Image (cartoon, coloured by chain):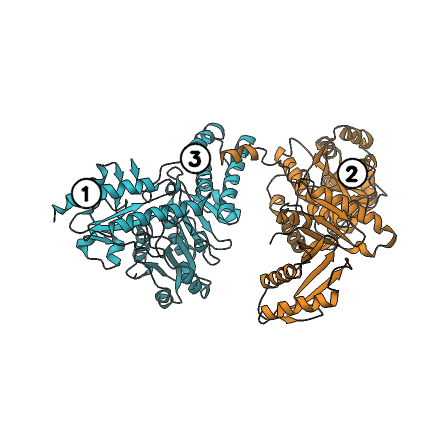
């Protein structure tokens, strides 16, 4: 099988699964227990945290464990809203965010907060000037994704950082769920960002684990109140097997990152340049540096996205409609909508998403199958 | 840049006349020990400078070690090139360009050991200075206090060029100041006091009182881990743990509450002095800061100090807590010190210890104790561990975990 749906989820690395099993079997004490057995679990927890901190260039106390990307996004947004309520009630985000961000914002709207959604250009990117114009004295949070999950657009984070430097009191959150291990580390961990959220299962860790970077000194309210774990910011007994497995998966992800990123970019371009020759193909993730190396979103006019997905599936090639979260709801992509793409063509969009394990050989097979299917689809037109 | 040598300048010891030889010898010994894991590296301690020839060793890692070595004023990594004027020009220019910021000033400082080299120092200064001026727009020459001083030394075996000067830890080489015993608790203060003691060249043995089951294994591990942090300044440290629970129990039984703390401290100091005699040490260091807590008032010091004539050195005596914390953070002991494990100073502490204990009363209350017997029992129970930089005690599974992660 050819798995080209890595933005939906990735296969857990066997090494990470092995770590998960060993930790579950040998270090199952509660890290908060006073006795020596609990202490061992605590040490493993902190060693995992230190490893992650070192890998992303953060301090130990800046890494907080969550249950995944959705929790991280909810936390950065609602936790800021709760902690900074007295300073203002205005939040800014983009029109192309993942539902975890979008719907958190909508919930806050119902509680009386005001939200500005920044528009995007034909490549799905916001402009720093629009951001600057949207900032008010009551703005408490700016939330921007690193890499769009549907079309792979990389937001202009360096320009956004320049704007944010003029507003040092406003919290800046980056949803980097799709951005880790894609050669964007310096852009994401810039000197201005306050919160960055990640999901383990997008980089070969098990489900149900993620982490958040929180700049030292920034205040955030906990969403999970309880026994006071994670410096009283995220209560709940730590999911140590998954945390250790995630630390391992992250280390593996970032080993030879540049090389793996180049391979993904080459595969993406090999497919892109092949399919763009066909008259009815529209490419949304163009061959431009503003697109991430691993996501390719395109449409075949007149064929529904679902049909394309199932047609490839018959050849054991797994791709998706624009995002796994919305793909069963029969709604067209919100990112393409925000880019003012016609509904007709948006419903025909599909997404290929790669990772470090994909090969050029798979790209060749994909292209061959594509030729064949394109012929078949002609009958639909 | 690929460095071939690090030139180390001596600190205060340059001014120490007669003792200079011993100081240099000791520093050479300490540096060799600190760098012993690097293969092929050569250390030569000469009368004016110390030279570390890298022979391919990782210069960043070596310089990291040198930063923790007391007795070093500063050091400069240098590049060795052939005695070829074009090669010299290219390297000098690269150094100037690497550090260039608008408005920067520089000077060239040349020395010529090899008098047969075709250019003399004036010619070299002129050629190299002009070359930099022509090729780095905006850079200016300044003879006194330039931003960048590029040193060029023509020696017999090549030309050594250096730009950067990196500050060292200062102080005196550990070992030149004799040996003392440090009373290490595990709090914030005593590691900082240890740092200052070692900085004046004193070799320290750590004495730690532990009281199981009133104190945990973790509290002991924490004190050892702190010692491992401090060991980077002196290569290796002997950690001497003294069992103290029996004494605390006995004191609690027979001494009025207000004097519990004073009498316990008197016992601790006696034990530290006994250890000092065993180890041929000449003094006791502790982390006391005047007035910080009940046991650190002048009256308390008088009542406690009464048990010995050995000098008690208190490097933190006049420092504020905030200053102490700052240093603790700098030397990377703070995060360990604040781990919440009870040590033997915090248990058996009465709710209201006397801040002004009376010397005569202290002596009187002690009369009921079998001081000699208690001390002998404690000293018989001593354990000595040699602790090396980087040793791990709090997380003994670190290597096992590293495999998992």
Q: Which mark is residue B272?
A: 2
In the figure, the shade used to draw chain B is orange
Residue B60 location in percent, x, y? 62, 49
Closest to the camera, between mark 2 and mark 1, is 1
Cα–Cα span, label 3 and label 1: 37 Å
Q: Is residue A245 left or right of residue A329?
A: right
Element assignment for label 2: helix
Q: Residue at x 25, y 55 (%)?
A: A336
Badge 2 local density, few (<14 within 10 Å), some, or many (20+)?
many
Chain under disc 2? B
Residue B35 location in percent, x, y? 69, 43
Residue A118 location in percent, x, y? 32, 62
* Mark 1 lies on residue: A373
Q: Residue at x 46, y 56 (%)?
A: A190
Chain under disc 3? A
Q: Is residue A252 left or right of residue A150?
A: right
Q: Which mark is residue A265?
A: none
Q: Which mark is residue A16?
A: 3
Please tell me which residue lies in front, A19 or A123: A123
Please tell me which residue lies in front, A286 or A324: A286
Chain under disc 1? A
Cα–Cα span, label 2 and label 1: 85 Å
Closest to the camera, between mark 3 and mark 1, is 1
Q: Is residue A367 left or right of residue A189?
A: left
In the figure, the shade used to draw chain A is cyan
Q: Quadrant of residue A307?
A: top left
Q: Is residue B311 left or right of residue A57?
A: right
Cα–Cα span, label 2 and label 3: 50 Å
């Amino acid at each position: 099988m050819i798995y080209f749906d890595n933005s939906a989820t990735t296969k857990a690395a066997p090494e990470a699964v092995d770590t998960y099993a060993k930790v579950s079997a040998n270090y199952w004490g509660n890290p908060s227990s006073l006795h020596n057995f609990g202490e061992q679990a605590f040490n493993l927890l902190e060693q995992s945290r230190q490893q992650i901190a070192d890998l992303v260039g953060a301090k130990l106390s800046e890494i907080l464990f969550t249950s995944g990307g959705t929790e991280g996004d909810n936390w950065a947004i609602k936790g800021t809203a709760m902690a900074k309520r007295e300073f203002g009630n205005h939040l800014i985000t983009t029109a192309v965010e993942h539902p975890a961000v979008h719907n958190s914002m909508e919930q806050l709207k119902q509680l009386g907060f005001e939200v500005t959604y920044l528009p995007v250009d034909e490549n799905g990117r916001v402009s720093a000037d629009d951001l600057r114009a949207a900032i008010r004295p009551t703005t408490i949070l700016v939330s921007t994704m690193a890499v769009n999950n549907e079309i792979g657009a990389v937001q202009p984070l360096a320009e956004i950082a320049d704007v944010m430097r003029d507003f040092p009191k406003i919290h800046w959150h980056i949803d980097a769920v799709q951005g880790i291990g894609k050669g964007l580390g310096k852009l994401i961990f810039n000197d201005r960002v306050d919160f960055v959220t990640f999901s383990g299962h997008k980089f070969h860790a098990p489900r149900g684990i993620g982490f958040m970077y929180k700049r030292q000194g920034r205040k955030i309210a906990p969403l999970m109140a309880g026994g006071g774990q994670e410096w009283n910011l995220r209560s709940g007994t730590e999911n140590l097997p998954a945390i250790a497995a995630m630390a391992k998966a992250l280390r593996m992800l970032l080993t030879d990152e540049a090389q793996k990123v180049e391979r993904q970019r080459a595969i993406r371009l090999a497919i892109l340049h092949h399919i763009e020759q066909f008259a009815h193909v529209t490419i949304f993730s163009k061959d431009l540096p503003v697109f991430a190396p691993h996501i390719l979103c395109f449409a075949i006019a007149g064929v529904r996205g679902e049909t394309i997905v199932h047609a490839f599936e018959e050849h054991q090639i797994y791709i998706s409609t624009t995002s796994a979260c919305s793909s069963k709801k029969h709604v067209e992509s919100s990112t393409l909508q925000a880019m003012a793409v016609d509904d007709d063509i948006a419903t025909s969009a599909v997404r290929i998403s790669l990772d470090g394990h994909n090969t050029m050989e798979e790209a060749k097979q994909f292209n061959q199958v594509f030729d064949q299917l394109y012929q078949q689809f002609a009958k639909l037109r | 840049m690929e460095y071939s040598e690090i030139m180390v300048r001596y600190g205060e010891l340059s001014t120490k006349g007669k003792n200079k030889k011993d100081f240099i010898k000791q520093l050479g010994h300490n540096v060799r020990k600190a760098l012993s894991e690097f293969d092929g590296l050569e250390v030569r301690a000469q009368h004016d400078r110390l030279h570390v020839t890298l022979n391919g060793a990782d210069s960043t890692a070596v310089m990291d070690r040198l930063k923790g070595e007391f007795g070093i004023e500063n050091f400069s990594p240098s590049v060795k090139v052939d005695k070829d004027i074009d090669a010299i020009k290219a390297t000098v220019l690269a150094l100037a360009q690497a550090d260039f910021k608008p408005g920067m000033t520089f000077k060239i400082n040349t020395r010529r050991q090899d008098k047969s080299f075709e250019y003399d120092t004036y010619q070299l200064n002129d050629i190299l200075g002009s070359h930099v001026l022509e090729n780095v727009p905006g850079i200016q020459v300044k003879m006194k206090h330039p931003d960048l001083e590029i040193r060029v030394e023509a020696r017999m075996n090549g030309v050594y060029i250096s730009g950067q000067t990196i500050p060292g830890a200062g102080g005196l080489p550990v070992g030149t100041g004799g040996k003392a015993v440090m009373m290490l608790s595990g709090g914030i203060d005593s590691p900082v006091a240890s740092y200052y003691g070692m900085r004046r060249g004193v070799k320290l043995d750590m004495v730690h009182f532990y009281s199981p089951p009133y104190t945990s294994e973790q509290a002991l591990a924490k004190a050892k881990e702190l010692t491992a942090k401090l060991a980077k300044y002196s290569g290796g440290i002997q950690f001497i743990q003294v069992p103290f629970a029996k004494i605390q129990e006995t004191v609690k039984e027979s001494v009025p509450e207000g004097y519990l703390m004073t009498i316990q401290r008197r016992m601790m100091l006696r034990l530290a002095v006994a250890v000092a005699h065993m180890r041929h040490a000449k003094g006791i260091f502790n982390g006391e800061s005047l007035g910080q807590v009940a046991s650190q008032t002048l009256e308390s010091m008088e009542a406690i100090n009464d048990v010995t004539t050995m000098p008690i050195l208190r490097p933190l005596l006049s420092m504020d807590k905030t200053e102490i914390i700052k240093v603790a953070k700098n030397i990377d002991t703070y995060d360990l010190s604040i781990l919440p494990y009870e040590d033997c100073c915090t248990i058996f502490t009465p709710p209201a210890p006397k801040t002004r204990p009376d010397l005569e009363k202290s002596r009187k209350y002690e009369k009921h104790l079998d001081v000699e017997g208690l001390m002998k029992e404690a000293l018989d129970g001593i354990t000595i561990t040699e602790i090396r930089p980087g040793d791990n005690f709090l997380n003994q599974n670190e290597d096992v975990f590293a495999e998992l992660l």
